[in-house]
Image (tube, helix red, strand yellow):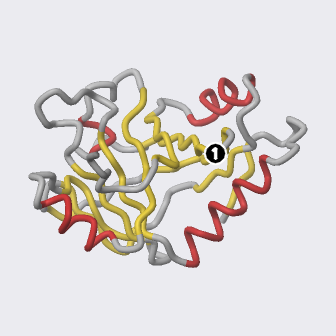
Amino acid sequence: MNTPVLGPVIQLGFVVPSIEAAVTHWTSIGVGPFFLLEHIQFGRCHFRGKPLSIDMSVAVGQWGTVQVELIQQHCDTPSIYTTFDGSSRGGLQHMGVMTDSVADSLTRLAERGVSPVQAGETANGIRFAYVDTDERPGAHPGGMIELIERGPAIDGFFSLVRKAAVDWDGRDPLRKLG
């Protein structure tokens, strides 16, 4: 039996032209509430090996055991969000998995010919890496994988999102966070 190199998918990441419109869609089918993080600050970020500075916002909601992440990039700077095949209209861009160590996961993936495309950490220390699983033979747009490193900041945020979804009554569908 072939053992997966990574853990299960916990998140579906969609690039959207409007977070507000996307939240309206997802909440109409009972997904939510969504927590909005506007103009995310990065401690460091690289795209294809070069420093990256982008202006983006995300909203995250819970759909059963899977998160739905809505990503809106506010600038035209080349990134994984502007260069994927569905970027002009929006669509599924990545699947997120949790890891104890982004660095260790990247080492294991490198042994299989998978490499990072965009990686870094947020200003509050959340480490991440997006890998080129959507560019390999037989792959397709939306097949990129994001590695998300466990830690107090991300664990706390993801817990908040999960708890808010339990018995959510449909009110206050988009909640702004710092």
Q: Quadrant of residue 135?
A: top left
Within 10 Å of the Cα at label 1, are there few (<14), some (14-19), or many (20+) other Cα atoms?
Answer: few
Residue closer to the observer: 137 or 77: 137
For label 1, the residue is 65
Residue positioned 70% across, 27% down in the render: 24
Q: Please identify the quadrant where the C terminus is shown.
A: bottom right
Say left or right for 45 vs 34. left
- Label 1, secondary structure: give it: loop
Residue positioned 50% across, 77% down in the render: 124
Where residue 72 sits in the image (x, y, percent)?
47, 41
Where residue 165 sits in the image (x, y, percent)?
78, 47
Say left or right for 85 vs 126. left
Q: Is residue 87 above or below residue 102?
A: above
Q: Quadrant of residue 139?
A: top left
Residue positioned 49% across, 60% down in the render: 40
Residue positioned 76% across, 29% down in the render: 30
Where residue 21 sits in the image (x, y, percent)?
62, 27
Q: Is residue 55 above or below residue 43?
A: above
Where residue 87 sits in the image (x, y, percent)?
33, 29
Q: Is residue 107 above or below residue 169?
A: below
Q: Which amino acid, mark 1?
A: Thr
Residue closer to the observer: 24 or 26: 26
Q: Is residue 85 above or below residue 108?
A: above
Residue closer to the observer: 62 or 86: 62
What count of labels does the image hold?
Answer: 1
Q: Quadrant of residue 156?
A: bottom right
